[in-house]
Amino acid sequence: MSMELIKPGVNIDFVGKMKYAVIFSSILIIIGIGSIIYHGGLNPGIDFAGGSIIQVKFSKNISADQIRAALKSTKLENSTIQQFGVHEFLIRTHESFSDQKMLAANVEQPLSTAFNKDFEIRRVEVVGSKVGSDFTRKAIIAVILSWLAMLIYVGWRFEFRYAVGGILALVHDVIITMGAVSIMNMEFTIATLASLIFIIGFSINDTIVTLDRIRENVKLNPKQKLGDLINLSINQTLSRTVLTSLTVFLTVLALYIFGGAVIHDLAFPMLVGVVIGTYSSIYIACTIVLTFEKMKPSIMKRK
């Protein structure tokens, strides 16, 4: 027996609401881009900007403020300190701590003075700024190549208008998710990049299911209006779309709530992306397919 949240034969007028969806998406994109401009770009983590992560474990209960006070007037004064598990902290800084003496002077000595050697440095990760900028370039190329590969695949597998709809829906998802990360002023780390790649894969999968059903219905009813066929197709695949997205959303939500601060870079963009990706599969991709259809007759008339 298949599980159905939405009863068969449901008939929601999605096409009639597409105007509002376009306005809603435009507002989200403007707010997101506005936030990125306001913050002077994304807030790059050390993977992209270069710097160091120092993981310190204490033997008793210590607060981030106490650590910050201990590191005052060292090179770690303006670093980000976040709790990581019990009595454990991550200190992130844009300084490069590749030299042992520098680490001793700026971390070990001040912490020893404040906490009587009741701590242990578990790991030190250092990324050079040159490596960081190289990594940034490769990350951008990776995302753009994934869009192009999907454009080619969907264009070959379906039709060009479906491919454009699918890709513009993906660009829409990525921009809104990056905007949400910027609004929360979160660091853009390698985990954030991984979640963007996940969103691209998740969203195109969802979009292709809907577009495939539209294509089947167009073949079965070639005389019917495309708007009606799009409505029919979205309603037919709605139960599957909602079930898939809800399962992923609840899993990621559990990760976000119980996974601790270190997982937030991965889980938060995924939460936003799953919701926006599902919405864009229905509204953005299909709106573009319909717009292409409306443009075609006017182009034919002009010819």
Image (cartoon, grey):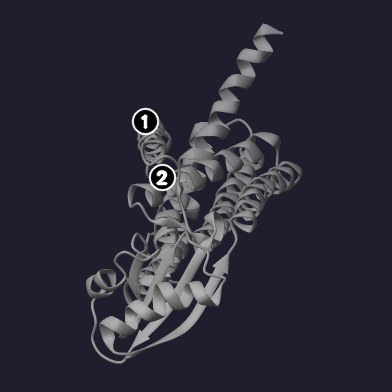
Query: What residue is rendered at 45% in x and 60% in y?
Result: 270
- Element type at marker 1? helix
Q: How many marks?
A: 2
Q: Which corner quadrant of the image does residue 84 belong to?
A: bottom left
Q: Position of residue 277 (x, y in %)?
A: 47, 51
The amino acid beneath tag 1 is: Ile
Query: What residue is rendered at 40% in x and 37% in y?
Result: 25
- Element type at marker 2? helix
- Res 152 visible: yes
Q: Position of residue 300 (x, y in %)?
A: 68, 14
Q: Which residue is mark 2?
A: 179
Q: Position of residue 114 (x, y in %)?
A: 26, 81
Other residues around mark 2 within 10 Å, as few (<14) / some (14–19) / many (≥20):
many
> On residue 23, which mark appears?
1
Q: Position of residue 75 (x, y in %)?
A: 40, 63
The amino acid beneath tag 2 is: Gly
Asked whether 210 or 274 is in front, the reply is 274
Other residues around mark 1 within 10 Å, as few (<14) / some (14–19) / many (≥20):
few
> On residue 121, which mark appears?
none
- Res 10 visible: no
Mark 2 or mark 1: name the one nearer the start of the chain.
1
| Rendered view: 26 above or below 2 | above
Relative to residue 25, is residue 154 drawn left or right?
right
Q: Which corner quadrant of the image does residue 36 belong to?
A: top left
